[in-house]
Image: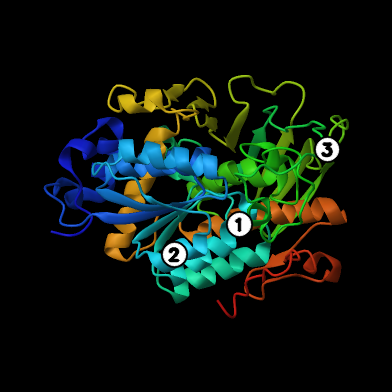
Amino acid sequence: MNSFNINRRNFLHGATAALALSTFGAQGMDLINPPKTWRVGLIGTGWYGKSDLFRLIQVAPVEVIALCDVDKNQLNEAGKLVSQRQKSGKTPKLYGDYQKMLAENEMDIVLIGTPDHWHALQMIDAVKAGAHVYVQKPISVDVMEGEAMVAAARKYKKVVQVGTQRKSTPHLIDAKKNIVDAGLLGKISHVEMCCYFHMRNNGNPPVEAVPAFLDYEKWTGPAPLRPYDGLPHVRWWRTFMEYGNGITGDMCIHMFDTVRWMLKLGWPKKISSTGGIYVQKEGKSNISDTQSAVFEYDGLNCVWQHRTWGTPNNPDYPWSFTLYGEKGTLWASTMSYDFIPEGKGEKIHKDVVFEKEKYPEDLKEDKIELNAAPATRLHMLDFLSAIDNSSKPVADIEEGHISTASCILANISMKTGRPIVYDPVKREIVGDREANNLLARPYRDPYKHPDYKNV
């Protein structure tokens, strides 16, 4: 019996079970008394770090042995919650320094739920320490970080799953299989992707003293050190380009990654983008409130649009993608999909799968995305299966890099005012020295930017 065998009671829950059984075949039926408990650590115990960890606890035998966070209050609270969730009832060891956590513990799996500017260093250090990694999206804040992350995963022969769990979302798996792959759309020659959420935290909080429970220097890490103006988590940090890549880096990656998966697309041939701060100019935020991007392929353009003001073009699909085929159109989001055929054919609608009755603990979890929980559970099962079989997971780090880097390159296009052609073999932007200088951000001393040639 292999190490992927999963506790029968936890595994046979709802739609996740049915999908997992269809995904993993006979292996999914061998579910009795697992011989192995996964030793797990989490770096970044905020909202989504805990959410990912709790989904893993729900579907696999794990012992969470260590947690790390630079916010002592957040860390201590996470320790209590984990002790209540995990079977052993033990409180994990608590750390303020992730490198010390990696050095003092042998872990099979490390989950990374920190802000984007920390992902690269932590993922690379974790695989060097011998762990497989589940890292949140986007994987990096610059393109060369992503190149180094892929190189590290391959060099140290570790499975790295990216938290682009749309690929494990039950109704989107159904749409891929029964709409796209079945040919109901016919030839697809145009894709639109969008986000119209008012999610750009825009304000002018005053500079204040850093609280004793937060190591702000360590939170900032390799990024520029901004004057402290309140706790950067949960969403405040996302409104600054110092730590991420704006709405395109945060939200486009999910939709673009899903489209690439559905249509079997690799790197775009050309990327162009325009936008800026057109409306919400009153606050400190420096991310765009309006942006369009075009990811070009042969005979196909994937077009992104976000606005953090106004109303969505379709109230039912405010964050979504739309595939336009010669035989019909597919609207899809985290909540549902609608297939609209050309002519008098049959329309098809499917909604998100909820598992609230099967996992009642979800209802008590603070800030949980109930629509995403089944997808994350299935994503974790895929991750464990890849570890067990020494194979690539559905959201392998290289796929996460292509989607992340493409969104970053769109921002570079917007900044330079020129289209971008990226050569993934030479790892350079073709014929544009200025743009090439933007592929790697400067790191704050004493941090060193990772190099794909020497990870």
Q: Nearer the viewer, residue 238 or 388?
A: 238
Work out how far the residue at label 2 is from the one at label 3, CA to CA, in angstroms: 36 Å
Sequence-earlier tag: 3 or 1: 1
**Badge 3: residue crowd in 10 Å (few <14, some 14–19, many ≥20):** some
Residue 248 vs 119, above or below: the answer is above
Quadrant of the rendering where the C terminus is positioned: bottom right
Residue 447 vs 279, above or below: the answer is below
Q: Look at label 1 and name its amino acid.
A: Trp
For label 3, the residue is 284
Q: Nearer the viewer, residue 146 or 203?
A: 203
Q: Look at label 2 and name its amino acid.
A: Leu
For label 1, the residue is 118
Residue 8 vs 156, above or below: the answer is above
Q: Which residue does the image show at 33% across and 61% down from the upper left?
A: 108
Residue 222 coordinates in the image, percent (x, y)? 68, 61
Give the secondary structure at mark 2.
helix
- On the image, which quarter does residue 442 sit in? bottom right
- Can residue 183 be seen in this snapshot? no
For label 2, the residue is 102
Q: Which residue does the image show at 34% across and 65% down from the upper left?
A: 106
Sequence-earlier tag: 2 or 3: 2
Residue 10 coordinates in the image, percent (x, y)? 22, 37
Work out how far the residue at label 2 is from the one at label 1, CA to CA, in angstroms: 15 Å
Residue 89 coordinates in the image, percent (x, y)? 27, 41
Apparent side of residue 110 relative to residue 280 in the rendered image (left or right): left
Q: Which residue does the image show at 80% across and 54% down from the upper left?
A: 413
